[in-house]
Amino acid sequence: MMEWTEKFTRWLKKGKEDATKVLDMPWDIEVKVEEDKDIITAVHPKIPFPVVIHVTKEFANIYMDTGVPTDTIDVEERMRAYKKLLYINTNLNLMKTGLIGEEQRVVLIVDLSLTSLNKTEFNEAITAISFGAHHVVEALGLTKELSNALLKRTAIMVSDKVKGGETKEDIMKFLIQRVGMKKEYAVEFMKKVMSTIEAAEKAGEPDLIYIQ
């Protein structure tokens, strides 16, 4: 593991839920070590998509894959979408948008040189890519789809916690403090998750797929 990987991981893990800076929130981290780079995957319930950081000796390339495919959009609408993405690139200094994969998914990118990088600059990069996702989603008119995706991801996380044996109190704390739900909504959300889990188990489908 590279020195910068350890530093990034430490900065991301250490934090408080009521932090005013994105970097100061406690992120869930996974690290994969490859021959020429380390790959950090950082996830927080309040951030719409995972943040993936490729760390080499000289650079940190930060990505956020929105999962939004553009290859299935008709040509005219696709051109409008590409123009909007280019407009975003023109107006943002740190973060840029791009396309990856055969589906031409929309991805957000921040490239950092490690020569003189400090924590403040890293925080600015993480903040830019985290909030940049909302700008992209709004520009493409996919706000509703993003909201549904976030709810589905949260439901899956809660389902994993239930199956992992965590108490109801711990899960409620997760929903209120980490996800940011109001207590009344968290109670109803928890009921829906439990109902869906029970229905899936009775149907012989133990994996949670969707929450109404």
Image (tube, rainbow, N blue to C red):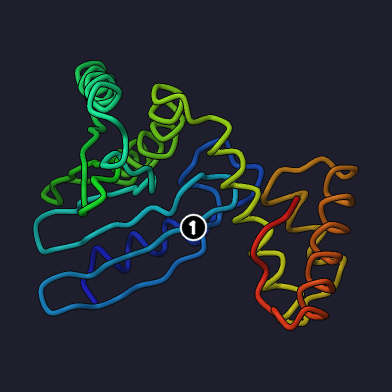
Q: Is residue 134 above or below residue 3?
A: above
Q: Is residue 9 left or right of residue 104?
A: right
**Res 92 seen here:** no
Q: Residues within 10 Å of mark 1 (few under 14, many from 20)?
A: some
Q: Could you tell me which residue is drawn at 24 percent across and 63 percent down?
A: 4
Q: Is residue 210 above or below residue 98?
A: below
Q: Quadrant of the N terminus?
A: bottom left
Q: Label 1 amino acid?
A: Val
Q: Is residue 24 above or below residue 58?
A: above
Q: Is residue 134 above or below residue 51?
A: above
Residue 71, percent from left and from top: 26, 42
Which corner quadrant of the image does residue 120 belong to? top left
Which corner quadrant of the image does residue 208 belong to? bottom right
Q: Could you tell me which residue is drawn at 24 percent across and 17 percent down?
A: 87
How many numbered markers are drawn? 1
Residue denoted by label 1: 43
Given residues 142 and 124, the one toward you in this image is: 142
